[in-house]
Image: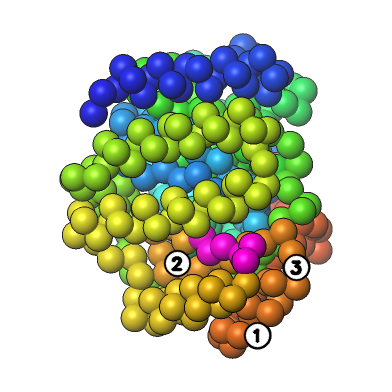
Amino acid sequence: MDTKRVFTIGENIKSALERDGLYQEIEYPEPSIDDGKISYGLSYPIKAFEKFLGYYDFAEKIAYNPSISFNTDFSFCLSACKYIKTGKTDSVVLDSVTNDSYTNKAKSALQSFKKKFKIEGSFQFYLKRYRKYEEAKGMSESSAVASAASRSLINNLFNEQKTVMDHLTSRFARLVSGSGTRASIEGLSIWLSYPGIESDQSFAVKIRDNPQDIFYGIFPKRNAIKTDQAHNNVKNSIFYDTWIYDKMNAVKNATENNFNSSFLIERGQKDSLNLHSLLISSGMFAQTGESIELLRKIIKFQADNEGIYFNADTGPSIMISSLDKNLILECKSYVNEDFLEGGMKYDDHEKKINDFKKESEAYFNSISRE
C-alpha cells in the first residue's frame, strides 16, 4: 500500500475539517484526582456509513482510513468508574460478570492512559448493557461499551468544556475499540485516522446532530464471527489496498459535499458490499444462510422501490435506511422478519440511570469490604 498517498489524502481531509471549524487538536488538561470518586458514563452504539476494518497500528488502534457514523438507539450502555489511590489492579465487570476480554483490553488502554497523565492507583469499572433485542451480531454493542467506559473515566478526572470532554473520551475509547471512538460523539461523526496521524490527535469529531432526515431500522441476526479476527485477516485480501484508496476518496467527497444524507446512506450500502467482498476474499464469512436470504428479499424490494439502502458490518444483522419513512415500513412488511425500527431520541437510559447508580455503588461497596 502507498501509505504516503493515504497520508496525503488524510491530511487534506483534516485540513478541510479544520477550515470548517469541526476539527481542532486536543490540548491535554491536567487531571484532578479524587480518591474514591465514582463517576458515570453513557453511550449509544453507532452504525457506520463509511466503515473501517484493519488497523495500521494495532497497539494504538489507528485505522487505515477515516470513518463516518451516526448513533443508533437499538441499545445503550451505562458505566460507573471508581478511582482507588492505593489500588493495584484495574478491573472490569460487564453485565454483572468479570469479563476477561474487556478486562484485557481495558488494562492495556489504562496503562497508556495512566502513563500519559502520570497517574498511580487503579480504576474499577461496572458496566451494563440494555438491549431492545435478545442477542445479535453486527449491532456495534462494543462501540457503546468502550465509549461509556471511556466517558466515565474522563468524567472522573476532568471537568472541561463539553467539546474537550467529548474529544478526550473519543481519543481514549479508541484504545479499546475503534468504533468506540465514534460512539463517543453524540451525532453524525467522523473519526480522523490514517497512517501517519499522531496518536494523540486521532479522535472523532461531531459533524452535526444525528440526521433527522434519515429513517432506519434493523433485522437483528446472530453469528459467531469475531471482529478482532476480522481486523487481522482482512488485510490479507488482494483487494484491501484498493478498498482503502476508494474509501479515502469517498470520505474526501463526503467532506466536500457537506456530508449529504442521501450520499451517506447510498455509500453505506456500497461500502457494505465492498466490506463483505474483502471478508470473503480473506476467508471469512460474516453472513449466514438466513441473512443471505434476508438480503435477497431486500434487494428484490429495492428493484421496485428506489431510495432505500441496506447496511451491514462484520455480522449478519442488516440495517435498512431511507429518506422516506414509508419505504422503511413497506420493506419491513415485505420482508416479514423480526425488525427493530430505529429512532433519533436517545432517551431510553433516563428510566434506568438511577437504578444503575444504586446498583453500581452497591457493587463498589461490596468489593471494598473484601
- In the rendered image, which residue does mark 2 sit on? 137
Upstream in sequence: badge 1 or badge 2: 2
- Residue at image point 49% right, 37% down: 250
What is the x, y in percent for residue 21?
71, 18
Residue 107 visible in this rendered orientation of the protein: no
Q: Nearer the viewer, residue 340 or 273?
A: 273
Kind of residue sitting beneath label 1: Ser
Give the mark toward the camera: 1 or 2: 1
What is the x, y in percent for residue 149?
57, 44
- Residue at image point 27% right, 36% down: 241
- In the rendered image, which residue does mark 3 sit on? 325
What is the x, y in percent for residue 167?
62, 27
Say the numbered circle drawn on residue 333.
1
**Magenta span:** 306-311
| Mark 1 and mark 3 residues within 8 Å of each other at the beta carbon | no
Kind of residue sitting beneath label 3: Lys
Label 1's element? helix
Label 2's element? loop
| Mark 1 and mark 2 residues within 8 Å of each other at the beta carbon | no
Residue 224 visible in this rendered orientation of the protein: yes
Does the stretch in magenta take in 84?
no
Residue 99: image quadrant is bottom left
Q: Nearer the viewer, residue 248 or 174?
A: 248
Upstream in sequence: badge 3 or badge 2: 2
Whether residue 158 is situated above or below residue 295 in the rendered picture: above
What is the x, y in percent for residue 136?
48, 71
Is disc 3 surrounded by few (<14), some (14 to 19) or many (20+) residues within 10 Å?
Answer: some
In which quadrant will I find the N terminus? top left
Does the stretch in magenta take in 307?
yes
Q: Nearer the viewer, residue 122 or 71?
A: 71
Label 3's element? helix
Residue 362: image quadrant is bottom right
